[in-house]
Image (cartoon, grey):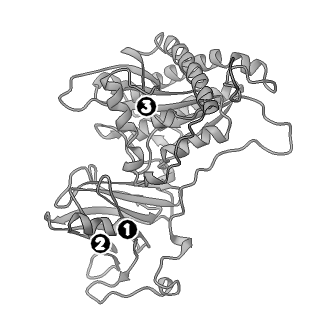
Amino acid sequence: MGPAYGQSGPIGQVPPAAVGPGFPIASDARLAGDSRQTRFVLDLDKTVPFRAFLLNEPYRVVVDLPQVSFHLPTGAGTSGRGLVKAFRYGLVMPGGSRIVFDLTGPARIANSTVLDAANGQPPRLVIELEEVDEATFARSVGIDSRLQSRPAESAPAITPAVAAQGGVVPPAVRPPPTTVAVSTPPTGGPPDTRPVIVIDPGHGGVDYGTQGGEVPEKNIVLAFGQSLRDRLERSGKYRVIMTRDDDTFIPLGDRVRIAQKQSAALFVSIHADALPKGEGSAQGATIYTLADKASDVEAERLAEAENRADQIGGVNLTEEPADVADILFDLARRETRTFSNRFARLLMNDMKTSVHMHKRPLKSAGFRVLKAPDVPSVLVELGYVSNKGDMGNLVSDAWRSRTADAMARAIDAFLAKRVANAGGERADKPAAPRAKP
């Protein structure tokens, strides 16, 4: 079976958006040292500005860079050394890349610099970590360590461009705050009254998701999401929006806000599960809806894993707004859950005719990405990358097309009234919060 292709290229390869022409290239990365002092070195083809900072709960070091094409050896970052358990890297937003280090314990950034090419060595980003106590780590959390570029074997020197900004990386080359570009209907014509479907390929960028051999989940679900989008757009019935259409990291809260901002009729999050080693075997697709209490232990495990996406990406969760908790909000949320459960049942019935389903195909748990109070939402685990049979399906063109067709049929059935009444009242979407007798 050959590789499966989506718009962004073969599954298992980095999409073209992450390796565009002109971006700096990272060709190798290595760790050295022990549990007291550890050094990370990244080989580049040109010097780049960066910022490095610490995050807690869990202990992490985050390094932000301009967009970089990572051509690192297979498996780079999966094993650690010294103070580093492991590290991940990837696009965190258009124009910005990120490296996230998981630490074994509290540490500080003792030195961070970019070395110019010298003595046969390429330009290098060097991060030196040093073991510290909890109090010292706590004082350092969130403090930036900015670019200091110097030639090899010479005293530190701030580059002229950085010196002109008082030693701080100029805003033009600093990765911007996370923003998400969302397509809008063209102006100048009649309003587009078609229902909006938001497709959410999970993970992306620095967040790989589960690993099945050499194919990360983020590539599998992006290819499937693009296939489902193309299938829906061919019908002409819907306006389809992707939360991501390339290898970009999108925080969970931003995914939810995209659906709310677009007044989506439906939000479908796409993932692929994996069982931890030694915990048996499982196979087939599963459909999840939101619940305060998980339907079983496996659903709870999965929700906890998926809800860690922001931590994996280095997002500070303390900045997330608190949930609204009033009566009208609660009424709208209950109604939305009813619609979500209705769609989940429709989806199961259509998928089981053409896709192998899990022995318990309908489950529920507290997934953060399903928490929009006014948008019916489901999370679909297409299969298990830890299962050889499922993995073969997940990278198959024919399986992906067949599954996208089944999902499209369920969407058609769920939104039939809405499509028929396009331009009028939304028949299959929760109304504005209202009091009930």
Residue 245 appears in the picture as rendered: no
- Please indicate whether residue 73 sits to the left or right of residue 418 in the image: left
**Residue 302 percent coordinates (x, y):** 35, 31
Residue 139 appears in the picture as rendered: yes
Q: Gap between marks 2 and 3, in whole Å? A: 40 Å
**Residue 397 percent coordinates (x, y):** 46, 27
User: Disc 3 marks which amino acid?
Assistant: Gly
User: Disc 2 marks which amino acid?
Assistant: Val
Above-or-below relation of 105 to 396: below
**What residue is shown at x 53% (from left), y 36% (from top)?**
200
Q: Look at the numbered disc 3 and give the secondary structure of its residue.
A: loop
Q: Look at the numbered disc 2 and give the secondary structure of its residue.
A: strand
User: Disc 1 marks which amino acid?
Assistant: Ala
Quarter of image, res 413:
top right
Above-or-below relation of 164 to 139: below
Q: Which mark is residue 126?
A: 2
Mark 1 is surrounded, within 10 Å at the Cα level, by few (under 14), some (14 to 19) or many (20 or more) other residues, namely many
Looking at the image, is mark 2 or mark 3 nearer the viewer? 3
3 or 1: tag closer to the N-terminus: 1
Q: Gap between marks 3 and 1, in whole Å? A: 32 Å
Q: Which mark is residue 52?
A: 1
**Residue 94 percent coordinates (x, y):** 54, 56
**What residue is shown at x 20% (from left), y 61% (from top)?**
83
Looking at the image, is mark 1 or mark 2 nearer the viewer? 1
1 or 2: tag closer to the N-terminus: 1
- Please indicate whether residue 106 sits to the left or right of residue 304 in the image: left
* 393 or 179: nearer the viewer: 179
Above-or-below relation of 187 to 376: below
2 or 3: tag closer to the N-terminus: 2
Mark 2 is surrounded, within 10 Å at the Cα level, by few (under 14), some (14 to 19) or many (20 or more) other residues, namely some
Q: Which mark is residue 366?
A: 3
